Image (tube, rainbow, N blue to C red):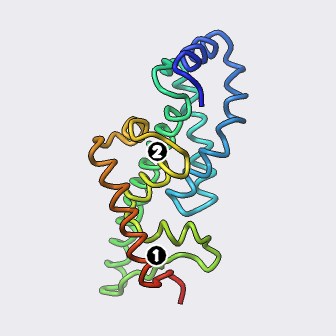
Amino acid sequence: MTSKRDEKGLAEALDRNPLLFEELVGVHQSALRNFLRRLTRNDALADDLAQETFIKAWQKLGSFSGQGSFASWLMKIGYNQFLQSRRKVSQEQRLEQQVQTEMLAGQAPVHSDGPSEGASDLETILAACTEAERLALTLAYGFGMSHGEIVEITGMALGTVKSHINRGKLRVRERFAHGETGYD
C-alpha cells in the first residue's frame, strides 16, 4: 500500500512524465481485470472493459489528484465502464426482445443465468449474492479495499457498503450451510 504522500507524488510525477502510466498499467492490470471478471462473469468482456478503463484513465489522467489511491481511482473508472456496458447490453436486450415478441408472437427468449460448468468455487460462492453484494465483497475481500475506498469507487453510501458486505457474507453462509453449491 502507498501512503497519501506517495499518491500525491504519483499524481505530480504522472503530470510531468506520462510514460509512467505504462508502468502503472503493468502494476494494476491484473487486479483490474480480476475485479471486472468478478463483476461480469465473462473473461472476454472483462478484458475489453479493462482495456477501455485504461484508455479512459489515460484520457482523465489530469483528474487524478492523489487524494485517494491510484488503485481506487482506477477501480472507480472500471466500475463506471462496467455500468455503461451493462446499460448498453440492457438496451440491446430490450430491443431484441421487442423484435422477437413482434415476430414470434408470444415465444419467450431462452437464456441461461446459471454458473457455467467450469465456474470456479469463488464464482459459485459469489453467484449466491446480489450484484451489489458481489461488488462490495469483491472490492473488500478480493482487493483489500477499505469501506471508504469502496464508497469512492461505487458512489454508495458508507452504510450501504457495510450492509451489502454483511448481507453478502450472510447469504453465502446460509446458502452453503444448506449444501446449495449451484451444481446439479
Q: Position of residue 23 (x, y in %)?
A: 72, 28
Looking at the rendered image, the quarter that the N terminus falls into is top right
Q: Residue at x 33, y 61 (%)?
A: 167
Query: Dot 1 lies on which element?
Result: loop
Q: Residue at x 53, y 72 (%)?
A: 124
Query: Dot 2 lies on which element?
Result: helix
Q: Quadrant of residue 26?
A: top right
Q: Is residue 96 above or below residue 151?
A: below
Q: Residue at x 68, y 34 (%)?
A: 25
User: Identity of the amino acid at label 2?
Assistant: Tyr
Q: Quadrant of residue 29?
A: top right
* Disc 1 crowd, CA 10 A, few/some/many (<14, 14-19, 20+): few
Q: Is residue 121 above or below residue 29?
A: below
Q: Which mark is residue 79?
A: 2
Closer to the chain start, of discs 1 and 2, is 2
Q: Which mark is residue 33?
A: none
Q: Which residue is mark 1?
A: 113
Q: Are marks 1 and 2 in contact (CB under 8 Å)?
A: no
Q: Position of residue 3 (x, y in %)?
A: 55, 22
Number of on-image labels: 2
